[in-house]
Image (cartoon, grey):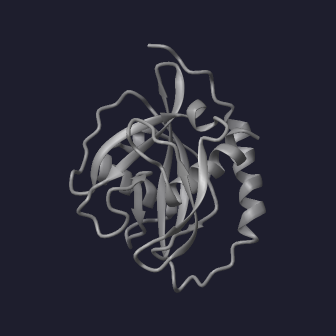
Amino acid sequence: MKNCEELNLKKIRDNLRIYSEKYSDQLNFDEKKFKKAAVLVLLVCIEGEWNLLFTKRSETLKNHKGQVSFPGGAVENQDKDIISTAIREAEEEIGISESNLHIIGKMPEFLTISDFAVTPVVAVLDWPIPLVISTNEVSKVFSIPIKWLQQPNIYDERIYTLPNGFHGEVIFFKPYDDEILWGISAKITVEFISEIINK
């Protein structure tokens, strides 16, 4: 198995801190309106290349069904903090254990059109490991190489109207492995690549 180039964890942590300080001050929203949630932005080493791990949400889910997303979900009472939320949800969805995770840090909250305030938690996931997929929530797990995500013109912003009345600019990546990364997960990915990895 080919090893990946060693990650500069100090640089990633520093960039997460700088990015969070830069944007957290600008993030003003009615906390009563938005439900807290967290996702895991998972770095995995596959065949000598760093990838991000994604899930495709089940078609039976109420919110964002059939969409490509990061593993994660809403805060529950038993969660001691937002990182615990991300880990618990990922364990429920794809069966990964906290013992296989190496948490690096977190990004500031992203607001969704479904009224969630989502905190992306960045971590390295030991790989390969067996996954246990909850088919009620997830229909597929796949990865996208960071080098692919770093390509110029790999995504565009389109004016999009959703059934709930939302009308505005939405990020769409080009298809990868017949899947399209778009919406809030695409926005998180763009910010992660541009502000954390490429800096």
Q: Nearer the viewer, residue 102 or 161?
A: 161
The x and y percentages for residue 11 are 74, 38
Quarter of the picture containing the C terminus is top right
In this rendering, the count of numbered labels is 0
Q: Which of 142 and 119 is in front in this view?
A: 142
Quarter of the picture containing the N terminus is top left
The x and y percentages for residue 182 are 49, 54
| Residue 95 in sight in this render | no
Q: Nearer the viewer, residue 173 or 83?
A: 173
Tell me: 162 left or right of 194: left
Q: Which of 107 and 181 is in front in this view?
A: 181
| Residue 22 in sight in this render | yes
Residue lying furthest top in this view? 1
Up/down of 141 relative to 161, above or below: above
The x and y percentages for residue 75 are 42, 69
Up/down of 153 relative to 112, above or below: above
The x and y percentages for residue 98 are 41, 45
Tell me: 1 left or right of 65: right
Up/down of 102 relative to 70, above or below: above
Q: Residue at x 43, y 61 (%)?
A: 85
Up/down of 182 relative to 11, above or below: below
Q: Residue at x 46, y 19 (%)?
A: 47
Q: Which residue is drawn at 23% across and 51% down?
A: 134
Q: Specify the quadrant of the image occupied by residue 133.
A: top left
